[in-house]
Image (cartoon, rainbow, N blue to C red):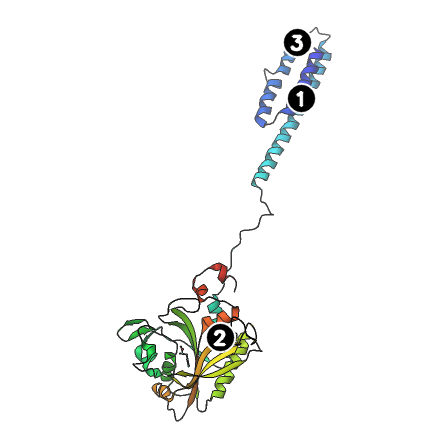
Amino acid sequence: MEFEIQKLLEDALERIRAVATESDLASLKTSLIGKKGRLTEYFTKLRELPAEERPAAGAILNRAKTEIEKALDEREKQLSEEKVSQSVRERAVDITLPGSMRRVGRLHPITQVTNEIIEIFLGLGFDVVGGPEIETDFFNFEALNIHADHPARDEQDSFYLGGTLLLRTHTSPVQIKVMRARGRPPVQIIALGRTFRRDAIDASHSPVFHQVEGLMVDSAITMGHLKAVLEHFAREMFGERTRMRFRPDFFPFTEPSAEVAISCVICGGQGCAVCKRTGWLEILGAGMVHPRVLENGGFDPRECTGFAFGMGIERIAMLKYSIDDIRLFYENDVRFLRQF
Ligand code: PHE
């Protein structure tokens, strides 16, 4: 019997080690030391042994039982620890994975350039005023000395809304409105906003675009003031070394009028593809406010003079950031917008 118990013990220990789940271990435990377990049976058999053999056999049996119980306990502990660490592993966070990022938005490049323009002119003492996008024929054309037969009024260039209303083709009507609202000089304002023309869309034209208008009227404003203001603007916007070129031009609402160019921001004036080898980039139209326009604004042209200028904000942004297609501004492609 001693030999049998020894064999049972060895076999039991081996099986306990091999068990892989807690429920298998529980049934193994029952089959070994449960009521009808294999080891339990030996305790019954013990009673059948001659009295003098019982103590020795009993001692061996008890030792075997203790050892089996110990092995069962240990294995039980091991298995439950394994189970815990496995569930931790399954639920674990991989701290090496990149986090889920919330992308921060930013201002549209047109808005950014608009804000920069505002900053520069605020620094020179200009007020920022607004104006409606829908205008009357009178403010958009007539009061600006653009008469009925002027080609700029052609249906081809304008979005008429019926009657005398149209989407403004430039920000210049604000000139008249501000003078009328203020009643007398001095006036020193810029006006920024959307303007509309029936232009076919291409790399440099859009039927909706943005302009900034400038107007300064006082008792003795000269072309010198205009040049000083625009040169300051160009240096602030495009850098200290920017040079300016004024050439005669024509606008019905300014006299004299000028077409203003800056030295090429790409080549510095040497001549390149962007400036079409001229070294210059046209950026705006300007001039001394026509006496009739001052009158239409309710000002007396014998008592005051003024300058005005108008430029496209897209054009400024395109030159500043070397953008070669105006359509990029309106397509809402974040791959483009994210760069500014
Ligand atoms: N309104 C003109 C345009 O849209 C620009 C301009 C404004 C020219 C003011 C002279 C003075 O082309």
Can you tell which quarter of the image residue 208 is in? Answer: bottom left
Circle 2: is it few (<14), some (14-19), or many (20+) Cα within 10 Å? some
Q: Name the kind of residue labelled 1 in the image.
A: Glu
The mark that comes first in sequence, 3 or 1, is: 1
Q: Name the kind of residue labelled 3 in the image.
A: Arg
Q: Residue at x 64, y 27 (%)?
A: 75
| Disc 1 to disc 2: CB gap under 8 Å | no
- Where's residue 168, x and y in %? 35, 74
Which residue of the protein is positioned furthest toward the top in this rendering? 50
Q: Is residue 150 left or right of residue 314?
A: left
Image quarter in which the N terminus is found: top right
**Residue matched to label 2:** 117
The mark that comes first in sequence, 3 or 2, is: 3
**Residue matched to label 3:** 47
Circle 3: is it few (<14), some (14-19), or many (20+) Cα within 10 Å? few
Q: Residue at x 42, y 74 (%)?
A: 211
> Distance from label 3 to label 1 (Cα)?
28 Å
The dot on residue 237 is none
Q: Name the kind of residue labelled 2 in the image.
A: Ile
- Where's residue 338, x and y in %? 51, 61
The dot on residue 14 is 1
